[in-house]
Image (cartoon, rainbow, N blue to C red):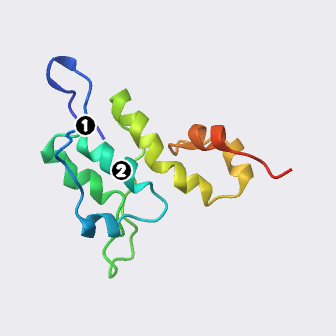
Amino acid sequence: MNVPSGPSGRAYVVDASYQMSDRDKSNVMSIFDVAALERLISMLPPEHREEVLSHFQYGDPTSEEAPPKLVQFDDPDLQAVLEEVWVPYWNTLPPEALFSDSEIPGRQLALAAFRPNT
């Protein structure tokens, strides 16, 4: 997703007044970090928030298609938080998945936290 950069190329910052509703939080798929997602969305201009949120929520139960999943931002500050959003996804996979190449965000963070059973 190509979200326009902030004014004068400034980095995105958290809008402390933004909070996801309880309903929105409950619709976030369990493979995503809700707190990180809320922080990510709070960094976006209001007109982009609903669209980005929809990428991480359960889709329409009558639809056969899964909701789209956002995996990349052009802005490095947004991408860094997006990486955090995806970490729980990696915890649902077998450990060997952490050692494969993937375009899915969060792998490096999950790998850094990986502690093999010894």
The x and y percentages for residue 55 are 33, 56
Q: Quadrant of residue 7?
A: top left
Circle 2 Cα neighbour tier, 10 Å, few/some/many (<14 / 14–19 / ≥20): many
Residue 46, relative to residue 79: is it above or below?
A: below
Q: Amino acid at mark 2?
A: Leu
Image point 31% across, 41% down: which residue?
Answer: 1
Image point 32% across, 64% down: which residue?
Answer: 25
- 32 vs 53, left or right, is right
Q: CA distance from mark 1 to mark 2?
A: 12 Å
Secondary element at image label 1: loop
Circle 1 Cα neighbour tier, 10 Å, few/some/many (<14 / 14–19 / ≥20): some
Of all residues shown, which one is farthest toward the bottom?
A: 62
Considering only order in the chain, which callout, 2 or 1, is on the residue closer to the N terminus? 1
Q: Provide the residue designation for mark 2.
A: 37
Secondary element at image label 2: helix
The x and y percentages for residue 87 are 53, 49
Q: Which mark is residue 98?
A: none
Q: Which mark is residue 14?
A: 1
The x and y percentages for residue 52 are 28, 51
- 4 vs 54, left or right, is left
Q: Amino acid at mark 1?
A: Val
Of all residues shown, which one is farthest toward the right?
A: 118
